[in-house]
Image (spheres, rainbow, N blue to C red):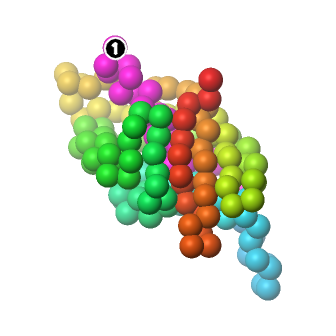
């Protein structure tokens, strides 16, 4: 049971902190045009995902709000410890997702992510392979004018 919870946490965390978009939602650069909040949030999720798959902790942590928390009681420090452990125990992590549903609410935003995540353990005698699918809800807030991930939870 603990292993299953760990796998579900990985998938949710991976998605919550950003997953690659197979639909190729690139934000075109138009001189003199400012990106919309939706485009910025989508770029953040893509950036975090690239950081996760490249195992670059700073790319993930840079986008978490100082007040970040999740339904498992993790704050920024706990997420960093969780990801350090994950990177030690698993090799390549692959995540796919569909285009996120982004709803702006003033200085906050809600994103619904639908995803799939797979990962192979470094030591199969200790950890099971990961292969999970699901949905998470990610909340963003503006901090000093920048969008930051504030909270995430499973969609029930």
Q: Is residue 42 left or right of residue 151?
A: right
Q: Is residue 5 above or below residue 35?
A: above
**Residue at (54%, 54%) from the top-left corner?**
149
**Residue at (47%, 34%) from the top-left corner?**
71
Which residue lies under the disc numbered 1?
1
> In front: 8, or 131?
8
> In front: 134, or 73?
73
**Which image quarter is the N terminus in?**
top left
Among the 4 quarters of the image, the one containing residue 87: top left
**Magenta stretch, main secondary structure class:** helix
Secondary structure of the residue carrying tag 1 is loop
Q: Position of residue 142 (x, y in %)?
A: 61, 64
Q: Is residue 60 visible?
A: yes
Q: Is residue 135 magenta?
A: no
Q: Is residue 26 left or right of residue 121?
A: right
Q: Is residue 18 magenta?
A: yes
Question: What range is drawn magenta here?
Answer: 1-25
Q: Position of residue 100 (x, y in %)?
A: 69, 45
**Which image quarter is the C terminus in?**
top right
């Amino acid at each position: 049971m603990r292993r299953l919870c760990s796998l579900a946490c990985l998938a949710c965390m991976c998605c919550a902190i950003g997953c690659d978009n197979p639909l190729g939602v690139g934000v075109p650069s138009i001189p003199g045009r400012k990106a919309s909040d939706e485009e910025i949030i989508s770029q953040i999720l893509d950036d975090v995902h690239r950081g996760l798959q490249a195992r670059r902790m700073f790319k993930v942590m840079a986008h978490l709000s100082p007040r970040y928390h999740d339904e498992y009681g993790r704050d920024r420090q706990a997420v960093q410890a969780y990801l350090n452990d994950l990177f030690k125990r698993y090799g390549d992590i692959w995540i796919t997702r569909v285009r996120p549903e982004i709803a702006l609410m003033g200085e906050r935003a809600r994103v619904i992510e639908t995803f799939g995540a797979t990962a192979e353990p470094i030591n199969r005698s200790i950890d099971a392979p990961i292969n999970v699918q699901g949905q998470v809800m990610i909340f963003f807030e503006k901090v000093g004018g920048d969008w930051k991930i504030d909270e995430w939870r499973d969609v029930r």
